[in-house]
Image (spheres, grey):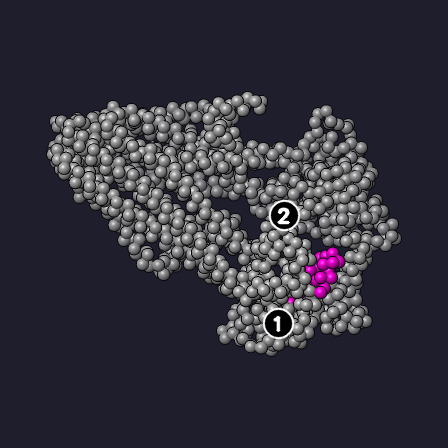
Amino acid sequence: MSRSRSSLWRRRNPLASFIPNLYELRPYLVAHARAYRIGYLCILATNGFSLALPWVMRSAVNHLERGGTGGMLRYVLWMIGLAAASGIFLYLMRKILIGVSRLIEYRLRGDFIDHLQTLSLSFFQRQKTGDLMARASNDLNAIRDVLGPGIMYGMNTVTAVLASLVLMLRLDPLLTLCTLIPLPITTFLIRNFSMEMHRRSRAVQDQYGALSSTLQEDLSGIRVIQSYAQEPYEETHFDGQSREYMRLGMRLIRYRALFFGTMGGMVGLLMLTLLWLGGVRVIHGAIGLGTFVAFIGYLGILTWPFIALGWVLGMVQRGEAAMARILEVSRISPDITDPAPADAIDPPAIRGEIRFAGVRFRHEAGGDGREVLRGIDETIAAGSTVAIVGKTGSGKSSLVSLIPRLHDPTAGAILLDGIDVRRLSLARLRSAVAVVPQESFLFSDTIRANLRFGKPDAPDEELTRALDLARFLRDLEGFPNGLDTLIGERGLTLSGGQRQRVALARAFLADSRILILDDAFSSVDKITESELLGSLRALQHGRTTILIAHRISTVREADRILVLQNGVVAESGTHAELIAKGGIYAGMERRQRITEEIEHAPAP
Amino acid sequence: MPPLHEDEPLYRTTIDRRLVTRLLALTAPHRRILIGSVLLLIAVSLAELAFPLLMKTGIDRYIRNHDVRGLAGLSGIYFALLIVVFVLRYLQTVLTQGLGQKIMYDLRARLFGHVQTLSAPYFERNPVGRVMTRLTGDVEVLNELFTSGFVSIFGDVVILIGIVTMMLVLDWRLALASFLVLPPLIWATLGFRSRVREAYTTIRIKVAAMNAFLQEHLTGISLVQLFRREGASSRQFDRLNSDHRDAFLRSVQAYAVYFPVVEFLESAAVALILGYGGTRVLSKTLTLGALVAFIQYSERFFRPIRDLSERFNVLQGAMASSERIFELLDTPVEVPLPAVPAVPDRLQGEIVLDHVSFAYKEDEPVLHDVSFRVAPGEAVAIVGHTGAGKTTIASLLVRFYDVRAGAIRVDGVDIRGWDLAVLRRRIAVVPQDVFLFSGSAIRNIGLRDPQTTPARVEQAITAVEARDFLERLPQGLETELRERGNLLSVGQKQLLSFARALAHDPAILILDEATSSVDSQTEIRIREALRVLIRGRTSLVIAHRLSTIRHVDRIIVLHKGRLVDEGTHEELLARGGIYAKLYQLEFKLQEEEEERTPA
């Protein structure tokens, strides 16, 4: 829909200015318009039948007043029949209208997650995972409450009030006015009450948060506290927090008690008004006792809708705030996207030459705003193996993350076979690159599913071959369910080395032109490492391989070694050249040699 | 509902009598409040029973006899009773809920006090999140247990008995007739409850599964994107999401059936009363007012029956929470306190390790038969490769753990005989990783200790030469340090930690130097601060810096959990061996590298 049209809509519909955020849900509601329409018919029907009940009671009581014999059975049957009919439509009303909110919630959540997946890594580095999850659960729940009970009770209240007003006015206009006056006041009171109650319970919630973070901190820093014998003072502090929580809790409780007391009192006052005024009207002969009893019935029916209206207003308020938080995320457009069709290049084949041309990079948020890469100019020949070494924080991982465009450089460009990677489609680019990430992240799923991550249709033989190359086959034979073994939280816990080897197999299986190993051998022993390096050589055949590593043994055979320091390439060359140079790399090598000597020194 | 950890059960199936006894014992300090709220509950329930009766009197005695004045009087009574009920109900609610708040407060104080005495092994076994849940979510569940569990169940029963009695007294035959709807009501309620509970259990499982999936896929989003799995993971999430939706639709179905059934039964009860009662009115054996009162009573007994089954669920849910809470309270302290704690009055600062052995896990010894003495006022460095057991010695000295064999003596007294708080106040440990609390530098250095006055904190800041960089922070010394994370560099945090130790003026200092390299300027500051810090104190430094090992009186060399050498830097270097290698690796190479690093 074009912008101008949607703003026209906004102007025309008062809802758009009253609840602008929730109004964005319109397309979802329109998609379920039929359900809402049928639901509304059910509301009409159930109210129609249930509002007839007091009318029957009126006839019955009038019949009783006139005296006579028998004849009560037909009233009983009428009442049971009406109650049953009302019940059936009440059932349909709830099922349809509450059900539809669950369907929309499902769609909203799915769309939200789909959107998240298009956002780039920098977004996730800015945003806490917990916060996003809270949006996907708590906020969507609040919105669903508006779409389900909110809309249902809202429509029901309006219907019930209008219909019973018509009926009651026909019975006795004066009594109707007198008894109904308190009801809108009740709605107003509930709205105000619930706003204040919301404020007070927010205060309780905030204090609960403060209490929790005091606790969190105390438990995380328990060693400092214990080693400085600070327990008594922490206890005093916690006691203060806990006492404040109790105080705020009592403040809420008193208010809530007042609220529910007032609600009960209002209903009582209604009955009192009826008893007194209605009684006088009966005595004066203005109405019959039957009408009096029918009024008892109507007031009973009307009480809940008015109470519900107050809750609905509160629900809408919360839903509006929740929707704002959802929109905050869903309005972010992904910053790493496919190239515009005019810029796109789709080369027939990718050889795997990578060139960093004046690459500079700085993380947008988080970190200290320091430039991580400060001018990298390097070419990695197609089919060669290049190792990158350097201290933690020297920019190794950032450098390789630019190749598959997890990030884009702040300046300069990365060229793949001479083509700026930003001009390739993301699917094309990323399918040319396989990465074994530093933390060798695996998903809580079967080994098979994890391996197939990069190649969904790979047959078992291929999986086995990849596992063999990654030296995991012997481990696998120890697992009772083989490839179907569940790993992760709900399954088998793999050791760091095992995880690295599975991640390696996953990358092998993807069979890409470019293989990036980000410190992928850190948790495997020396012997396995040399076997894995052998596998890598076997796989090489024209593949470009980039190895980030700490151990000299991992990198010494590489065609070229880059030493990264403070975001620039400080040294580069083959192992022999760098050793001869006697610089940073040579220092690293010496250090590792002595470490080994110490580790192998026997304990006395 | 508190977040559940996977290994924790959702419900206990039975209501354990032993647990209930222990729970009720929690009310003991507030017995008067409990009795008061129960009495008020009975009073308010009885008072509410009077309203239908007043309606009956109004109809029978005044309306039908055309007595306007009498009706006005009755309305006055009705109004007065409304006020009375309002006040009683208010007091009762405040009292009952207040009881819950007081019990929560007591319980939290007890739990917190206890948790603080627990030692390091407990915190290694139990992640912070889990311990927090005990003190937050689980305690809240117990609150619910007291407020809407015990007291309300009692209240519902009182109301039910009252209504049934009133109806039987008014007209027992009509009462029995209206009780006809009770069996189907109870049957429907029980069926509904079990179905809803089933649905909610499924929902909770699905919610947990969705959260786990999201957590994992948002954390591993880069992999999803790298392997172009967005579509596949969308479909995978869709399965969980639709399972969740379907489970919810089942609960919607249960509610959609239950509410109409209850409403129908309510109307059916009214119809029964009207039919049978009406016949009785016609035969003049029942008044019209009594009929109306009956209808009102019958409306009132639906709610407590509906609520009761809900309350039993609360009770059951609370059993699991209370069991977890009591389990924490019953966790023994692993570092036992001496029966008669020794408080040596003048601290010399002598440390003796006497054939100390220690292992975190039974079969993996960390320290093996280590003995050495540090004389009062002496500065000793411990060096050794990773895993030599250096940091363990620091933990043993302040009794985070107890030795497995041998003994550690401070001033000739076994530390297991010391008053633990006094011992820890006299020994300051400066750990490798500096833990920052939220709050300013002042708060972080002084902690919450009233003895570390702001003046002393400021003195310490000046002494370690941290003043200039702290004052350069956005709000100077008052800057919130934790919120923004990276305000301080590693070296600056070290200095802060030094100031923390200095402000608490310990007799013995144990310093675990950070391994990470810092810029040369900070390096100089740390060196100077260290000199200030160890002046006049017995010091044990786990050394990672060349300057440190050059300035201490003596060096102890640990290798694979054993003491292998001892002496001054020059002596040890002359002897060669492991020290010479360690020296090259940890100190000399490091220094060379730092010289190369452009500042």
Name the residue located 47 percent from the left edge and 40 percent from the top edge.
Answer: B203
Q: What residue type is disc 1 on?
A: Ala
Q: Is residue B394 above or below residue B340?
A: above
Residue at 55% across, 21% down: A5
Q: Residue sitting at 60 percent across and 69 percent down?
A: B505
Q: Looking at the image, is mark 2 or mark 1 nearer the viewer?
A: 1
Residue designated by label 1: B507
Q: State the image coordinates of residue A206 (x, y, percent, origin top left).
A: 48, 48
- Residue A348 or B35: which is nearer the viewer? B35
The amino acid sitting under disc 2 is: Phe
Is residue B544 in sight in this rendering?
no
Q: How many marks?
A: 2
Q: Is residue B524 magenta?
A: yes
Residue A391 rendering spot, x and y as whole percentages: 75, 51
**Nearer-the-camera pick, A537 or B167:** B167
Relative vertical location of residue A430 with respect to residue A162 in this rendering, above or below: below
Q: Are marks 2 and 1 on the same chain?
A: no
Is residue B453 among what the camera can see? yes
Question: Which segment did they paint magenta?
Answer: B510-528
- Above or below: residue A564 compared with residue B296: below
Q: Secondary structure at mark 2?
A: loop
Is residue B310 left or right of B209 when viewed as pictured?
left
- Callouts 2 and 1 close, C-beta under 8 Å: no
- Does residue A159 show up magenta in the picture? no
Q: In the image, residue B562 lies at what x, y percent?
A: 70, 69
Above or below — where is A535 with respect to B587?
A: above
Res. A435 mark: none
Q: Chain of mark 1?
A: B
Residue on which the image places disc 2: A479
